[in-house]
Image: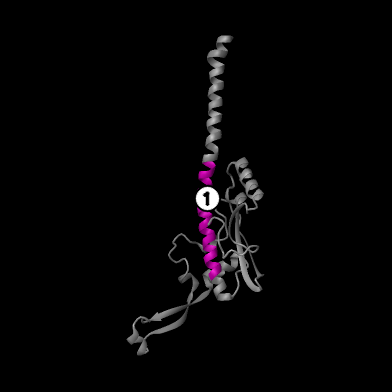
Amino acid sequence: MKKILTYIVFPIIIILLAFLIIRSIQQPVKFNKEKTLREAAAIVKLKDIRTLQVAYKNVNGKFAPCIDSLIDFYNNGKMTVIRSIGSMDDSLAVAQGKVKREAIEIPVRDTLLKNRPDFKASELKFIPFSDGDQIIMHETVKEVSGVDVPLFEAQIPYASLLKGMDRQLLVNLVYERIETDRFPGLQVGSIENPNNNAGNWE
């Protein structure tokens, strides 16, 4: 019996413990690697929302109230752009009146994000890797230093972005963010603390 314990049972226990230790070390590494990958995809979406929101505000004087409004703006909206004819550096052309600036309206989709073949407006509202969860967005007008300022925020909670990943590590991450008074996820803009539409990853 002693020999069985010494030569069979104990080695098995040692191997099992070694396996558990290695797995406990690797889990956070694997979690952080996958988290970084998912965050990168989410940041692209939030930057796209910011780009469209800034353009929407330039046209409408306020931010869009929801992502569906941004999608409609991208698909059907128009923007005014200034087209230059000639160069202001050419003093002779300026003197002869050959240098002109004219405002023209062009479709938003022909101007914004047109160099992004991976951009799909219809998917703008969905959080990557979440099985259909939607990005949370709010807009408001807030008095800042005596001036009414339009504000917006778009949020992707970790609970959605990191869905399906290690449950305990996700709970720990969310708890740590809340305890340090930070949004538990990724966010661009803020309706509480105006930040010039910055992302909390920047």
Label 1 Cα crowd, 10 Å radius (few <14 / some 14-19 / many 20+): some
Most foreground residue, 52 or 186: 186
Residue 148, given in percent of the width and then of the height, sits at: 65, 73
- Residue at (54% x, 42% y) in the render: 31
Residue reaching furthest bottom? 96
Residue 131, given in percent of the width and then of the height, sits at: 58, 51
- Residue at (52% x, 69% y) in the render: 74
Quickly name the residue at label 1. 38
Residue 20 against residue 42 in the figure, above or below: above
Quadrant where the image shows the N terminus: top right
Q: Amino acid at mark 1?
A: Arg
Q: Which residues are magenta?
A: 30-54
The way the protein has been coloured in the rendering is one colour
Most foreground residue, 18 or 128: 18
Most foreground residue, 124 or 52: 52
Residue 5 against residue 201 in the figure, above or below: above
Quick check: 96 left or right of 49?
left
Q: Residue 24 in magenta?
A: no
Residue 27 against residue 61 in the figure, above or below: above
Residue 11, given in percent of the width and then of the height, sits at: 53, 19
Majority secondary structure of magenta residues: helix
Residue 179, given in percent of the width and then of the height, sits at: 66, 48
